[in-house]
Image: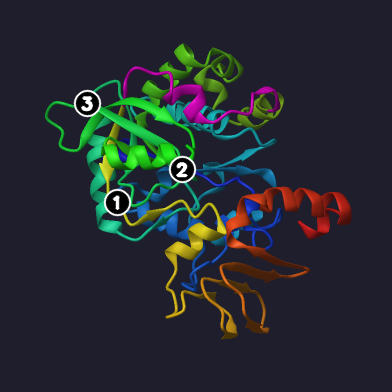
Amino acid sequence: MRSHRYCVVMCGGVGSRFWPFSRNDRPKQFLDFFGTGKSLLQLTVERILPLVDIENIILVTNRQYAGIIREQLPGVKDSNILLEPARRNTAPCICWAAHHIHALDPRASIVTLPSDHLVLKEQAFIDAIGEGLRFVEEGDRLLTLGIQPTNPNTGYGYIQQGAAAQGWEGIRKVKSFTEKPDLEMAKMFLDSGEFFWNSGIFIWSAESILKAFDRYSPEIAQIFGAPDSEYASPAETAFIDSVFPNAPSISIDYAIMEKADNVFVKTVDLGWSDLGTWNALYEASPHSQEGNVTQNCKVLASECTGTMFAVGGDKIIVASGLKDYIVADNGNALLICPRADEQKIRQIVNEVKGSFGDEYV
């Protein structure tokens, strides 16, 4: 069965909320945030290897990152790196990858992973993915992993669980999806015990997800609806270059998961974070007695509390009187921002680009 198991790693995002560390030419998935000597992408691929052979790992990314991926993952063959000619969110990415894999192996089951998440409990991850693969291999099912929430976080989407899947511990039918709620609603979700964070980790067979596109997202299905002979062949690149830019920019949640009636959730505790923001990295990092975090840099902090310091190069940071701030310096850009305002960073990046040009983003 292992030979029919594949993994799609989505690694084409820009990660603008991590500016100025994450840049257009080297986004966060290619960075070593924790001083391990490995990027988030490398850790993601390493994490799935106990379950999926390297020959069956497919990377989907923007064309400009081909060189970085080959540098960081020399064991992945070029034909397993699918290069998007445009950015179109996760649904077109997943549809293309599913067609590519189905052409290689119509019996394939697929784990779909973001490339930039943190998972501290790796054995729990392996156990959950292994069970999830067995679950989808038994029928026409779409499975996502739901993370046990630890706080009323408004930065995550939520999944409401329904009836139990007979014979499968911890797997339930999905009752509803909710995009990022406000704080009051997030508190209600947490108190109810029925809601879990949406991890963005999916498991399904190639056949099941392509059937779901046909039924729930016919526009995307039609765009990628070439015969299998077009995929995993010399004709694939030219075909994708001609059709991919016409695909709508839409997430897999909106395109499929919120509409389908065969969606299940497996609830897990993985020591997980999507590392989507500086605050998420702050929460996932070791703290000093004063609640400060230093990311691979030298800091002298006086009367500073709850502050995140992340500085590239060999600079020494001397700071006084900062409370709950982000101080991030990388290359030609320095960000000093209250942690409470981190949702403004995308807007800041757009303003920097408009005022000073692409070289600063």
Identify the disc placed on residue 138.
Answer: 3
262 relative position to 200: left or right:
left
- Pinpoint residue 275: horizontal percent, then vertical percent: 49, 55
Secondary structure category for the residue under label 3: loop
Which-is-in-front pick, marks 3 and 2?
2
Residue 173, picture quadrant: top left
Mark 1–mark 2 Cα distance, whole angstroms, equals 29 Å
Say which residue appears at 66% left-offset and 27% top-offset.
244
Residue 323, picture quadrant: bottom right
Whether residue 359 is visible here, answered yes or no, is yes
> Do residues under tags 3 and 2 come within 8 Å of each other at their CB atoms?
no
- Pinpoint residue 280: horizontal percent, then vertical percent: 49, 57
- Pinpoint residue 6: horizontal percent, then vertical percent: 38, 39
Q: Nearer the viewer, residue 222 or 178?
A: 178
Whether residue 8 is visible here, answered yes or no, is no
Q: Quadrant of the N terminus?
A: top left
- Pinpoint residue 301: horizontal percent, then vertical percent: 58, 84
Q: Amino acid at mark 2?
A: Leu
Q: Amino acid at mark 1?
A: Phe
Q: Amino acid at mark 3?
A: Glu
Identify the disc placed on residue 223.
Answer: none
Mark 3–mark 1 Cα distance, whole angstroms, equals 20 Å
Say which residue appears at 42% left-offset and 36% top-offset.
185
First reached walking from the N terminus: tag 3 or tag 2: 3
Q: Outermost residue, left direction?
A: 167
